[in-house]
Image (cartoon, rainbow, N blue to C red):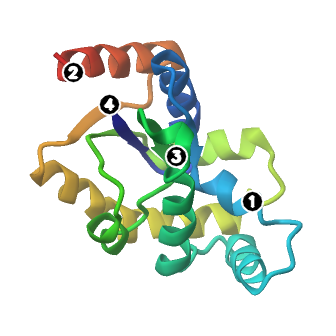
Amino acid sequence: MNIVVMGPNGSGKSTQAKMLADKLGVPHISSGDIFRSLENQQSSLAVRIKEKLQKGELVDDTDALALVEERLAKEDCIKGFVLDGAPRNLYQAQNTKAKIDLVYYLKVSDETCVKRLLLRARGDDTDEVIKTRLFNYHTLTEPVLDFFRTKNKLIEVDGEKKEEEIFLEIYNSFLEFSK
């Protein structure tokens, strides 16, 4: 089964996606990890992506789709995957070649996201970059939720709970969905 976990930066989507992938025995694919893996490369694509990430901006649609789809086409994803960080906007959701069976949306307030991001203390988590990411999420990514909602593929989860409670809710709904 091909699953996407969505939520704003700091919602815990990567943590939940990793836990779900481990439980299901499929790979966890993170668009952020894919983009960051280009960090030491000097190709024009890598330079473009690094510049975008440093500003807290989104990677261009064509670049993002190509990189994510290239990863999803690998043999380890044949039996399914858990993806986080993509699709990031309506264009990507409508134009991805990847078959998406189920989408989990972790609902978390901006206030909680900011607190969590500042706690993880990653170099690119500055106040300004966090605000840009949250703004981009609300304006560009939230319409993707409606896209999947209309296809009856979206399950909303309260991302404000404890990590284990969130996972239990996700996994139980997965079991219910896959009956």
**Residue type indicated by callout 2:** Ser
**CA neighbours of label 2 inside 10 A, class few (<14), some (14 to 19), many (20+):** few
Circle 3 is placed at which residue position? 111
Screen quadrant of the N terminus = top left
Q: CA distance from mark 3 to mark 4?
A: 17 Å
Sequence order check: which comes first, mark 4 or mark 2?
4
Q: Secondary structure at mark 4?
A: strand
**Depicted 47 relative to depicted 85: above or below:** below
Q: CA distance from mark 1 to mark 3?
A: 26 Å
Residue at the front extreme, as displayed: 75
**Depicted 115 relative to depicted 47: above or below:** above
Sequence order check: which comes first, mark 3 or mark 4?
3
**Residue type indicated by callout 4:** Val
* Location of residue 145 (image quadrant): bottom left
Circle 2 is placed at which residue position? 178
Residues marked 1 and 3 touching at CB (< 8 Å): no
* Residue occupying the point 51% across, 21% down: 25
Mark in the foreground, 2 or 3: 2
Q: CA distance from mark 2 to mark 3?
A: 34 Å
Circle 1 is placed at which residue position? 36
Q: Secondary structure at mark 1?
A: helix
Residue 157: mark: 4
* Residue 146 visible in the snapshot: yes
Residue 25: mark: none
Q: Position of residue 138 (x, y in %)?
A: 39, 63
Mark in the foreground, 3 or 4: 4
* Location of residue 88 (image quadrant): bottom left
In the image: residue 162, left or right of residue 154: right
Q: Position of residue 178 (x, y in %)?
A: 21, 21
